[in-house]
Amino acid sequence: MAIYLPGTVEEEQLALDDLTPREIVAELDKHVVGQKDAKRAVAIALRNRWRRLQLSGPMRDEVLPKNILMIGPTGCGKTEISRRLAKLANAPFLKVEASKFTEVGYVGRDVESMIRDLVEIAIEMVREEKLEDVADKAELNAEERLLDILLPPSPPARPESTGGLVLEGNTTGAESQARTREKLRQQLREGKLDDRTVEIEVRERNFPSFEIISNQGVEEMDVNLKDMLPNIFGQRTK
């Protein structure tokens, strides 16, 4: 029996180790008009960072990484070049406003918050990548669960005993249910059961949030207390 796992055709993710500076510039040309010198400079800098990661020991110190500082008027492509480079390198990207960090008093933000935001973005990127890896399996499991609700499996037939012989029950009922299940599966995939209402139990998790006042400012932090104190908060179903 063939199992059809629907999916979408996505653009293949380019690997940084397969791209030369010229190819990096070609990728940037698809989204940024002009700025040839800037795109060439950032492409070489990005490739040098990749080369440095491939080296080990004293040789790594010979290839110095270069930080990139782009200066220009609004709309010239600074942010777009940076964002596209981060996507090519599969690295977290964060845009900040310097004025938020120069304000004094309780309004300004800590510079360290940029590191925390980058880490959160990186964690979210990994989470999305792992979700994509199990998307087909999760969709199949959800389909099987819906079919179990629409057509609950029948209990196994008990073998009949006649004298000293044991006769297995008739398998016609099981085969009929299997055919019905496959018909429901086909209707589910074709969208013919979208108007059908089913009830399922889901776990409800409520995580409290609070504010921490630091000497540099007020920052709202969502804390998952369940991970910190797993035995205090129970899980409820609804």
Image (cartoon, rainbow, N blue to C red):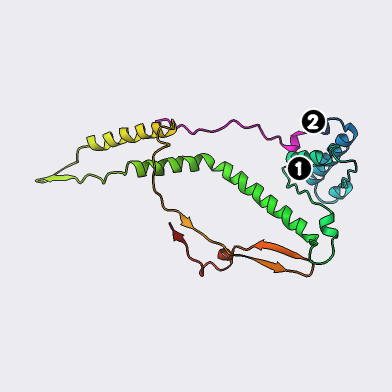
- Residue type at tag 2: Glu
Residue type, numbered disc 1: Ala
Q: Is residue 67 left or right of residue 124?
A: right
- Callout 1: 10 Å neighbours few (<14), some, many (20+)? some
Q: Decide which of tag 2 and tag 1 comes sooner along the chain.
A: 2
Residue at 62 percent of width and 32 percent of height: 10
Q: Secondary structure beneath disc 2?
A: helix
Residue corresponding to mark 1: 86
Q: Is residue 5 magenta?
A: yes
Q: Nearer the viewer, residue 229 or 111?
A: 111
Q: Left or right: where does residue 88 sit relative to residue 58?
A: left
Quarter-wise, where is residue 107 in the image? bottom right
User: Residue 148's x, y, as percent?
Assistant: 36, 43
193 over 163 or under it: above or below: above
Q: Which disc, if any, is residue 23?
A: 2
- Seen from the viewer's position, the closer of residues 21 and 196 is 196
Residue 93 position in % (x across, y down): 75, 47
Q: Residues within 10 Å of mark 2 (few under 14, many from 20)?
A: few
- From the image, which quarter does the N terminus lie in? top left
Q: Nearer the viewer, residue 92 or 205?
A: 205
In whole angstroms, how far apart are the C-alphas of marks 2 and 1? 15 Å
Task: Report whether 67 appears left or right of 159.
Answer: right
The residue depicted at 51 percent of the width and 39 percent of the height is 136
Span shown in magenta: 1-19
Nearer to us: label 2 or label 1: 1
Q: Is residue 107 magenta?
A: no
